[in-house]
Image (cartoon, rainbow, N blue to C red):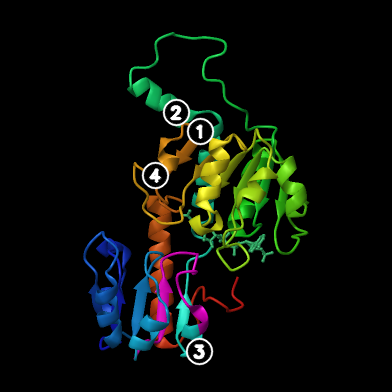
Amino acid sequence: MGSQRVVATFHLPREWLGALPDLTDFVEWGSEEPAPRDWLLKEVGEADGLLCTVTDRVDGEILRAARRLRAISTYSVGYDHIDVGAARARGIRVGYTPNVLTDATADLAFALMLAVSRRVVEGDRLVRSGGWRIPWSATFMLGSEVHGRTIGIIGMGRIGRAIARRAAGFDMKVLYSSRTPKPDVAAEYVPLDALLPRSDFVVLAVDLNPSTYHMVDYGFLRRMRRSAYLVNVSRGKVIVERDLIRALEEGIIAGAALDVFEDEPIGADHPLARMNNVVLTPHLGSATVETRRRMAEVAVENLLRGLRGDPMLYEVGSEVP
Ligand code: NAP
């Protein structure tokens, strides 16, 4: 296997890579910045395996340049950045990292729900800016409760289920909409039109695909309660961001908590960054030491198995759960 070249588009700590650098001719993009397209186009030309992540667009052009490529392993559960159909048509297998990041992402969804409705970030900003002057008041910075409310989860997959489990612990009524009902989930399956007006928190946990691209537009937001919050831990392109900004400006919904954005990264001049009823995190869903290490183990194992011609741990389009 030592003669097989593996190109990694991002840096992982050496100890997370296991045997990969020893077993292969390993080349890595050595900066925290996303690998430039030109670098990837050049390097992929001699690669047998590609270790990539969500910031890489692995499209037809890259795949045509990848004359020897046999295995792609993405360090993510989402694979909307890869043209999987084109890869498979060329006999290139695609591995991904489901399950190991599910709980970390569901935890973040709850952190966002609590932060936006209990005004945690706004309160922190107020204290740090010296704005906390009256020690206590019965009506000071009142938020909205999470426990006992209704959560509407859109996308009852791995992460949606983990969010539903947490919601049960908060005594929440759980509604969900998905492409197909999940009889094993203790929650009420409802059409989207019924979920939106009933939910105090609408949480997006779908994958990005043609049916979810720009699913959340002005019409969607108008169907939510004016007192409701929108939470997104899925992909930024599920939301028409300019419609969300308009809805927040007009008070169509109470607030939003977002981990992902249409074009990442966003800066301090972004309209959402100027709104007090919005909580923003920089794509942190899976960002814990434990989860990122487990993702590395899975991604490396997927790649090594792909190069050997063995079944991957998790392969896009395979029957493995
Ligand atoms: P998953 O198990 O594949 O779940 C996706 C769910 O979305 C499925 O249940 C699917 O429904 C549902 N869905 C797809 N299209 C839909 C539509 N039009 N309407 C309603 N539901 C729809 O994936 P997962 O592991 O839970 O991950 C979900 C996504 O979260 C990933 O693809 C990724 O983009 C994102 N993510 C983000 C972070 C982050 O850092 N913020 C971290 C991890 C994952 P059916 O089962 O009925 O087909």
SS for tag 1? loop
Q: Secondary structure at mark 4?
A: loop
- Spatial CA distance of label 4 from label 2 is 17 Å
Residue lying at 51% horizontally and 73% vertically, measured from the top left = 314
The circle drawn on residue 140 is: none
Q: Quadrant of the N terminus?
A: bottom left
Q: Secondary structure at mark 2?
A: helix
What residue would you read off at disc 1? 277
Q: Nearer the viewer, mark 2 or mark 1?
A: 1
Q: Is residue 159 above or below residue 92?
A: above
Q: Residue at x 77, y 48 (%)?
A: 194
Whether residue 22 appears in this view of the structure is yes
* Dot 2 or dot 3, earlier in sequence: 3
Residue sitting at x 76%, y 61%:
181
Q: Reading the chain from its start, which is encountered first: label 4 or label 1?
A: 4
- SS state under label 3: helix
Circle 3: residue type: Ala
Kind of residue at badge 1:
Asn
Q: Do the CB atoms of the residues marked 2 and 1 lie less than 8 Å apart? A: yes
Q: Nearer the viewer, residue 83 or 224?
A: 224
User: Residue under circle 3?
Assistant: 89
Residue ID for mark 4 = 270
Answer left or right for 270 relative to 97.
left
Residue 227 on the magenta segment = no
Instruction: Give the extent of the magenta segment.
Output: 68-85
Residue 164 image offset from top left, x and y in percent: 66, 48
Q: Disc 4 versus disc 1: distance between alpha carbons?
A: 14 Å
